[in-house]
Image (spheres, helix red, strand yellow):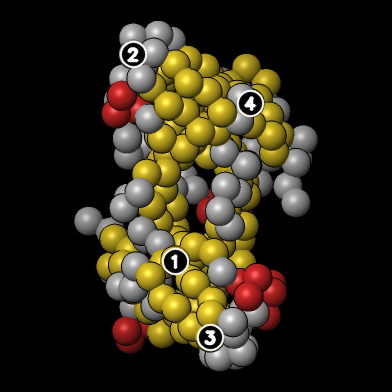
């Protein structure tokens, strides 16, 4: 299994509070991704990073920000959590390169509930 | 817009029976193709991938998939299902030229296995 950890694994927070989720990898992979998984929607990309300090938006980026100050860590922040952000969040990594960027390996997920 | 369709939301098969999960994509060129499996409460595990070449690809856990360009399909098969195969299966497509490494996921097919 790819060395990917996510923290926390479970979190309950109140509407309007800031929340930061952490993804940590030990594979030294260049690309990192944040997805959310919701029933009936599959997985949708929130943000991704193609290197330290290099990030870009995905399909559902509104209300989320990310940062990557080190190769191994990719942080997802909800500046002011809303109930619509209740979801399971997955981090993924890939080596990069032409096809390799698409071969992604996933972390165990963080279940976030916003009350 | 590119899309991935998994027509079957839920499939039930008997242990020892064969399995085929369907996946169709909408895209003008040949994309990169993947199947992932997710057990309850777990992250996604890569089963197999297709980049180019032989259209029949072998994966882990005895799974295989066949790419059919004419049908824009990438169906997953297993000749004899085991109870431990009960999980949710996701087809994913990588579109070259889009957001680097951006995978588009189908909404998943949940597999139940009868003893």
Q: Are marks 2 and 1 in contact (CB under 8 Å)?
A: no
Camera-near label (1 vs 3) is: 3
Write down the residue under mark 4. A7
In terms of secondary structure, where does tag 3 sit?
strand
Q: Residue furthest top?
A: A17
Q: Is residue A79 visible?
A: no
Chain bearing tag 3 is B
Binning the other alpha carbons within 10 Å of mark 4 as few (below 14), some (14 to 19) or many (20 upward) gives: some
In terms of secondary structure, where does tag 2 sit?
loop
In terms of secondary structure, where does tag 4 sit?
strand
In x, y percent, where is residue A90? Answer: 53, 39
Q: Is residue B12 above or below residue B95?
A: below
Q: Are marks 2 and 3 in contact (CB under 8 Å)?
A: no
Q: Are marks 1 and 4 in contact (CB under 8 Å)?
A: no
In x, y percent, where is residue A103? Answer: 58, 55
Q: Measure the C-alpha gap from mark 2 to mark 3.
A: 45 Å
Question: Residue at point 49% right, 62% down?
Answer: B88
Write down the residue under mark 3. B14
Left or right of A69: which side holds B113?
left
Q: Are marks 2 and 4 in contact (CB under 8 Å)?
A: no
Q: Measure the C-alpha gap from mark 2 to mark 4.
A: 20 Å
Write down the residue under mark 2. A15
């Amino acid at each position: 299994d790819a060395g990917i950890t996510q923290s926390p694994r479970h979190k309950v927070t109140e509407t309007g509070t800031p929340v930061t989720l952490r993804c940590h990898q030990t594979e030294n992979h260049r690309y990192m991704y944040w997805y959310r998984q919701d029933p009936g929607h599959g997985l949708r990309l929130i943000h991704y990073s193609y290197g330290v300090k290099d990030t870009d938006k995905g399909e559902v980026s509104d209300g989320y920000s990310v940062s990557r100050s080190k190769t191994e860590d990719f942080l997802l922040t909800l500046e002011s959590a809303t109930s619509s952000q209740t979801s399971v969040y997955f981090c993924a990594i890939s080596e990069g390169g032409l096809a390799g960027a698409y071969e992604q390996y996933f972390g165990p997920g963080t279940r976030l509930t916003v009350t | 817009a590119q899309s991935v369709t998994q027509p079957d939301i839920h499939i039930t098969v008997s242990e020892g029976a064969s399995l085929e999960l369907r996946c169709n994509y909408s895209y003008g060129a040949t994309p990169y193709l993947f199947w992932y499996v997710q057990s309850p409460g777990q992250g996604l595990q890569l089963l197999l991938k297709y980049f180019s070449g032989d259209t029949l690809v072998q994966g882990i856990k005895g799974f295989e998939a066949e790419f059919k360009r004419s049908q824009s399909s990438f169906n997953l098969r297993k000749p004899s299902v085991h109870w431990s195969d009960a999980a949710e299966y996701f087809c994913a497509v990588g579109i070259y030229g889009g957001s680097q490494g951006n995978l588009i996921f189908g909404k998943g097919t949940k597999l139940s296995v009868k003893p």
